[in-house]
Image: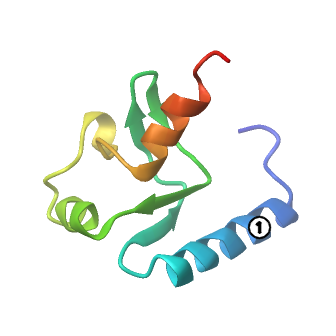
């Protein structure tokens, strides 16, 4: 990414991660986690992963191309947001 995001961007990502972890404590909110989508590997600023899938990732059972997770909560969001209106 060029130029890199400003400090405020990283600070906002930190706040989002903290909120997700507080509101959804069974899963995990992580920064810059690769996600495999139909359009290739995407790296959202923040990703939330459910508890069962987090266990699969830790065991190395759920990775796809390039080590990217095969799915996440954001994969669906990316697909929905890319639909024509």
Observer-nearest of 3 and 21: 21
Q: Residues within 10 Å of mark 1 (few under 14, many from 20)?
A: few
Classify 70 as above or below 19.
Answer: above
Question: How many marks overall?
Answer: 1
Observer-nearest of 78 and 33: 78
* Residue found farthest to the top: 84
Which quarter of the rendered picture does the C terminus lie within?
Answer: top right
Residue at 44% x, 46% y is: 34
Which quarter of the rendered picture does the N terminus lie within?
Answer: top right
- Looking at the rendered structure, the secondary structure element under dot 1 is helix
| Display coloring | rainbow
- Residue, disc 1: 12
Which quadrant holds residue 26?
A: bottom left
Classify 4 as above or below 56.
Answer: above
| In the displayed structure image, the side of residue 46 where residue 11 appears, left or right | right
Measured as percent of width and height from the top left, residue 18 is found at 61, 79
Residue at 44% x, 39% y is: 76
Measured as percent of width and height from the top left, residue 46 is found at 58, 58
Residue at 28% x, 70% y is: 51
Measured as percent of width and height from the top left, residue 58 is found at 22, 66
Classify 3 as above or below 49.
Answer: above
Measured as percent of width and height from the top left, residue 84 is found at 63, 15
| In the displayed structure image, the side of residue 78 where residue 68 appears, left or right | left
Residue at 28% x, 41% y is: 70
């Amino acid at each position: 990414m060029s130029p890199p995001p400003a400090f405020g961007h990283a600070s906002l990502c930190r706040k989002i991660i903290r909120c997700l972890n507080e509101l959804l404590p069974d899963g995990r909110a992580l920064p810059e986690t690769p996600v495999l989508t139909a359009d290739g590997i995407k790296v959202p600023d923040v990703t939330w992963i459910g508890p069962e899938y987090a266990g699969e990732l830790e065991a190395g059972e759920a990775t796809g191309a390039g080590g990217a997770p095969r799915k996440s909560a954001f994969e669906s969001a990316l697909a929905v947001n890319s639909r024509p209106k």
